[in-house]
Image (cartoon, rainbow, N blue to C red):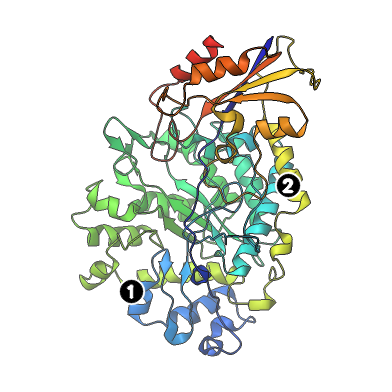
Amino acid sequence: MKCCWFILGASAFVSGQEDPESRRQSYPDCVNGPLSTNNVCDRTLSPPERAAALVEALSIEEKLQNLVSKSQGAPRIGLPAYNWWSEALHGVAYAPGTYFPQGNVEFNSSTSYPMPLLMAAGFDDNLIEKIGTAIGIEARAWGNSGWAGFDYWTPNVNAFKDPRWGRGSETPGEDVLRIKRYAEYITRGLDGPVPNEQRRIISTCKHYAGNDFEDWNGTTRHDFNAKITMQDLAEYYLKPFQQCARDSKVGSIMCAYNAVNGVPSCANKYLLQTILRDHWKWTEHNNYVTSDCEAVLDVSANHHYAPTNAAGTAICFEAGMDTSCEYTGSSDIPGAWSQGLLKEETVDRALLRLYEGLVRAGYFDGEEAMYADLDWQHVNSAEAQSLALQAAVEGMVLLKNNGTLPLDLDPSHKIAMIGFWADAPEKLQGGYSGRAHHLYSPAFAARQLGLDITVASGPVLQDNNASDNWTTNALEAASGADYILYFGGLDTSAAGETLDRTDLDWPEAQLTLVKVV
C-alpha cells in the first residue's frame, strides 16, 4: 500500500444572489437620447474635454449622487446609473456590479483561472500576460452585455509578507520583484495593447498601502494602524503600486482600510497626492482612486481620525480619493457638502477623473468603441481553458517524492481518496470567483480515468462528529486499497478575507486522520 498527500489551498466558492433582468446595466445613448447633444458624445474631442462637458452639465445634487460606487447617474440629461464595482481577480467574478444569469443562457459562466498565488508561482510572465488578456476580453464582453461595468478591481498587489494573512492567496506572493512583474504583465493584458488610445477595461491595483492584516487579538483591518518605516515603505510596501501607477499607468488605484503611520489610507494626502500623483506622475490621464468598501466611514468611526463622518468624508476627497465604495450610504457626502467641508472644485475634480476613465474605456462610444465587438462568443474559449490548465500545471510544486510517484494507474488497482478536498469541486475554485464553466474534483478526474476509487471526506479544522465520523469512513476506504491518496488543505474557515490564521500549524484534525490511516 502506498500513500500520497495532496495539499490544496483555496478559498471558498463565492456565490451570488440571483436577481432579475433589472440587474443589467444600461449604457449612454449618444445617438438618440438627451445625452446626444452633450459633447461627451463627440468622439472628435479629447477625453478630458468630453469628461468636462459631462460634468459641467450636472447640477450639484447630481454631482454628489455620483461620488459613490453605486452612482445614480443623471436621468435628466440621459446619464445612466453605473456601478463602480466589478471583480476579476482570476476570472470574471461575482460582485455587486457583476452578474451571472441563471440557466443555460449567455454569460452564465466565465473561465476560472488558479488563484494569483499559484499563477505567479509559475514564474512565466508571458503566460500571465496571456491570462490577463483572456480575462480582459471576457470582462469587456461582460461590460458590453450590461452584466458588468467597464472597471474591475484587480489585481491585488499587496505583499504576502506574513503567511498568517488570510488573503495571501489573492496576491502574487511575498517577493516584491515577483509582485511587480506580475502586476506589469497582468495589467498589460487586462487593459489591452493600446491603453493610451482606449482601454479594454479599467484595471484597479489594490489595496494601497501596507495592507496585509484582517483580524487579530481585537484589532481588525478597519482600525489597524500599520507602522512602517520610510525605508520599508519605499523598498517594499510601495514598490508594487509604483509599478502600477508610474510604470504600467493603470486607470485606477484602491486605497485600503488600514492607516499608515497614523493616517487612514483613504485620507492620506501623502500617499494619494505626494507619492501617487506628484512623485510617480500618475497624472498623464485623469486616473482615479476608489476607496475600499466602507473605508470612508472607518476614518471617523474606527480610526477616530476625524470627529464626524461628514468630516472624514471631506478629508478623504480632499486628500485625493475620488469615489467611495459603500453598501448602503455609509459615507456622509451630503453632510460634508451642507456643512461646507467639501468644496465643489474637489467634487468636480473627482468626477472629471471618474468620467474620463469611462471615456477612455469607450463607455460613451456605443458600437464605435474599439472593443464593442466582444460578446458571449469570446467567453469560455478553448484557448482560455487551455491557459487555465497551463497556469495550474506550471504553478504546482512537488515538495518531495520518495519514489512513489508517478503512480501506476492500472485499473485493477484500488485507490482510496481521503480528505476534504478529494471531492469538493466548489471549494477548489478559490475566492473572488464567478460561476466556472468547468469545475471538477480529483475524484471526478479519477472516475473519468476509469479508476477503482473509494472516497472518504475529512475535516478542515476540527473533527465534526455531528456530520461525519472521519476516522471510521477513512479506515473503511483505506481497507484493501493499493494506494491511499490524502487531499488536505485549508478553506475560508481557516483563512480568508476578514480571517487571519493565528499560527502556521497544520490543522490537528487533519494530522490525526492522516496518522490513523
- Answer with left or right where residue 252 lies relative to residue 125: left
Q: Which residue is mark 1?
A: 344
Q: Looking at the picture, which amino acid does disc 2 mark?
A: Gln
- Residue 171 position within the rendered picture, expressed as x and y whole percent measured from the top left: 54, 39
Q: Is residue 243 visible?
A: yes
Q: Nearer the viewer, mark 1 or mark 2?
A: 2
On screen, residue 9 above or below 197 = above
Which quadrant is the N terminus positioned in?
top right
132 over 217 or under it: above or below: below
Which of the pair 342/500 is nearer the observer?
A: 500
Q: Earlier in the sequence, mark 1 or mark 2?
A: 1
Dots 1, 2 in contact, CB < 8 A: no
Near-viewer residue (431 or 410): 410
Please give the residue where the numbered disc 2 appears in the rendered image.
Answer: 385
Which residue appears at 43% of the width and 30% of the height? 494
- The residue at the point 37 percent across, 78 percent down is 62
Counting other residues with Cα less than 10 Å from the Cα at mark 1, is it few (<14), some (14-19), or many (20 or more)?
some
Q: Nearer the viewer, residue 32 or 318?
A: 32
Cα distance, mark 1 to mark 2? 48 Å
Q: Position of residue 328 (x, y in %)?
A: 33, 62
Q: Amino acid at mark 1?
A: Glu
In this view, 94 is above or below 498: below
**Residue drawn 36% across and 48% down?**
265
Regarding mark 1 in the picture, which secondary structure is present there?
helix
- In the foreground, 91 or 124: 91
Q: Position of residue 361 (x, y in %)?
A: 60, 67
Query: Dividing the image into 4 quarters, which one contains the C terminus?
Result: top right
Query: Mark 2 Cα within 10 Å, few/some/many (few <14, many 20+)?
Result: some
Image position of 122 (left or right of 331): right
Residue 376: where, in percent of width, then height?
A: 69, 63
Quarter of image, res 117: top right
